[in-house]
Amino acid sequence: MGTILSNYYQKTKMKHLIFLLILITSSVWAKNSRIELNRMDGTKIIAVLSVPDPSKIFSVFIHFQGSSCMDPVSEELSAELLAKNIATLIVQKPGLSYPLKESECAGEKYLTQNNIFNRVKDAEEVLKFVLKKFGHWNKQLYIFGRSEGTVVATLLSQKVKANLLILFAGANGMTMEEEMYTLIKKGEKVCGEKDKEKLKLQIERVFNKSVPTDLWCSGSSSPNSNQWWSKILRLDVTGELLKVSYPIYIAHGRLDDMVPVESSYELVKDFERYGKKNFTFKEYPELNHKWRDPKGVKHYEEVIFDMNEWMKKNI
């Protein structure tokens, strides 16, 4: 196992040299392009680009899913975008195939390869490919991230030219570790703990454990390894967000029990402190992380509607 991991980390230090393969299929409502790019280590970057009409000029909306092993673009979101002739692009998480095989979520490939920095690299390579192969893309790029994906979206915003940045349920005004302590202060249980000092000890073990593939604080649909946590827990991306000059939209539920809304409040304070005016913060007083109210009713369509109204004003 140690040799496998050592070889993997050595290889991932090398520049991504990729060979290209694209399979075009179609459906009634869009043109779906499956994109496969081969990394040097033999694994694949897999993405799906849904283009309303490839013969016409289109923009690209890249969607970064949250912590779930597979979190496709929602029907509500994709329908609105396709109606505007905006293509949706989703890049599969490292170590997973497409369609997803259930066993892969806890497999060695996923646990060793999946982290926010590899996700950013994969997105860069896919966008280069789309630019090269799809002549009708007008280079207009809208970056969208939800939950964990907001960190990936923010990091990508520094790597590519984009026009909009949209963050759902995670604005990153705090590090993830700080968000966890904030949740405990609010009375929430985090990773099985309601005591801040006990959680601190668990977090230190994450950084000190020698087996990167060991799981910590994971669910059946969102297994996260020590190496995944070690790269994201203490990452501060506020500076990256302050560098963004184009419009930013932040949507957050006040009752979020996974990413505290206080993280968004802190970001708003930072933007105001530096005189930045290019952001819009939309708070939903009665909604949680999954956009449900206290009765369990989902309000995602409302959240998407508000985002679309904002997009109309800023595209």
Image (cartoon, rainbow, N blue to C red):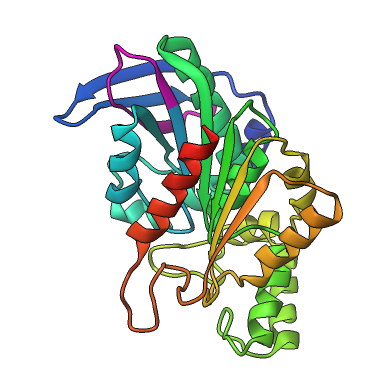
Please tell me which residue is depicted at 33% across the width and 83% down the height of the picture.
295
Looking at the rendering, the stretch of residues picked out in magenta corresponds to 40-59
> 39 left or right of 244?
left
Residue nearest the viewer, comparing 225 with 159: 159
Residue 256 sits above or below residue 39 on the image: below
- Residue 91 at what x, y percent from top left? 44, 37
Lateral position of residue 40 relative to residue 175, left or right: left
Snapshot quadrant of residue 37: top left
Q: Is residue 202 visible in the rendered structure shown here? A: no
Q: Quadrant of residue 209?
A: bottom right
Q: Residue at x 67, y 41 (%)?
A: 155
Above or below, 43 against 198 in this view is above
User: Is residue 266 highlighted in magenta?
Assistant: no
Q: Is residue 223 left or right of residue 27?
A: right
State yes or no: residue 52 in magenta: yes
Q: What x and y, as percent, mark residue 307?
A: 46, 49
Location of residue 220 in the rendering, given as x and y in whole percent from the top left corner: 39, 68
264 or 279: nearer the viewer: 279
| Residue shown at 57% from the left, 78% from the top | 191
In this orientation, does residue 312 appear? yes
How many numbered marks, from 0 up?
0
Q: Quadrant of residue 252?
A: bottom right
Furthest-right residue in this view = 274
Residue drawn where x is 48% and y is 55% of the image: 66
Q: Residue furthest left?
A: 28
Q: Position of residue 89 (x, y in %)?
A: 41, 33
> As rendered, which of 129 and 141 lies closer to the eye?
141
